[in-house]
Amino acid sequence: MSAFSSASRLRRIAISALLLTVSALGGCSSIDRLSQIGEQPKLSAIDNPTTQPGYKPVQMPMPKPEVASYNPNSLWRNGSRAFFKDQRAHQVGDLLTVTVNITDKANIENDTQRSRSNKEDSGITDFIGAKTITQANKILPGRILTADSTASSEGKGSVDRKEALQTNVAAVVTQVLPNGNLVVEGKQEIRVNYEIRELIVAGIVRPEDIQSDNTIDSTKIAQARIAYGGRGQIMDVQQPRYGQQVMDVLLPF
């Protein structure tokens, strides 16, 4: 009875510790969510991406610097597409429009089967007339070695993935690399009723890939980071509760 009481006490202590941990992890979030009941989710404030805690300047392999060449007594400017000023983004703080057009589709199916069967059988049934001797029949074995083995494996795998996303988002130039490439980052938030949809685009673009209307296709962005999601009441019911998420991490079965 004492051992049973000790086990029950330990079980209660473990459950209490788990509840305290869960409360500590989700306490602030729960309070914030309770204060927003019946209200629309708030939009994020417009801020400088370079001041964010996780922001890090991009470092990429750079070519050797080249000496700029000038053409005296010429109206043509090296690197310019026209005699007039280029309105496309080219320095920190400039804006450009990113056309996000993702239509990916993948269909892969694999089927592998293997089978092998082996059988080994060896023995001595008669050795120089040993069958005529009664005692020899008892000593000589009918089968010395008998072995059977069977192996088979079967594997199947399939991938069927479809993605489609078409939208536009304005991005700001946050950094100009030594070779002239631009580091851009843009974020867009749209609130519809009680749901916020957000789109984040970041990456490195070449000034030559920017169109004359100051737009660039997302397929021409190197190191592209594109995130499309949301938050609000619909997203809230689609996610498991934080207690269930903690249990999924802690439980080994």
Image (cartoon, rainbow, N blue to C red):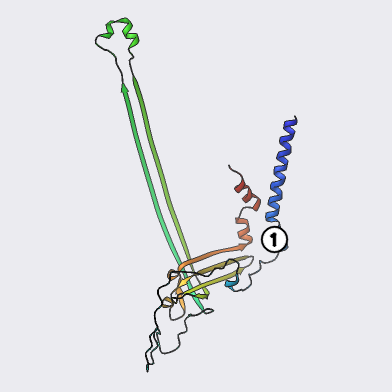
Residue 224, given in percent of the width and then of the height, sits at: 47, 67
Task: Give, as a three-letter code, the residue at label 1.
Answer: Arg
Q: Residue at x 72, y 59 (%)?
A: 31
Q: Observer-nearest residue: 1 or 106? A: 1
Q: Quadrant of the C terminus?
A: top right
Above or below, comparing residue 130 to residue 6 in the picture: above
Quarter-of-image position of residue 208:
bottom left
The 10 Å Cα crowd at callout 1, few under 14, some 14 to 19, many 20 or more, is few
Q: Observer-nearest residue: 84 or 162? A: 84
How many marks on residues?
1
Q: Observer-nearest residue: 96 or 33? A: 96
Above or below, comparing residue 23 to residue 133 in the picture: below
Residue 133, given in percent of the width and then of the height, sits at: 29, 5
Secondary element at image label 1: helix
Instruction: Farthest residue to the bottom: give it.
Output: 73
- Residue for badge 1: 33
Q: Quadrant of the N terminus?
A: top right
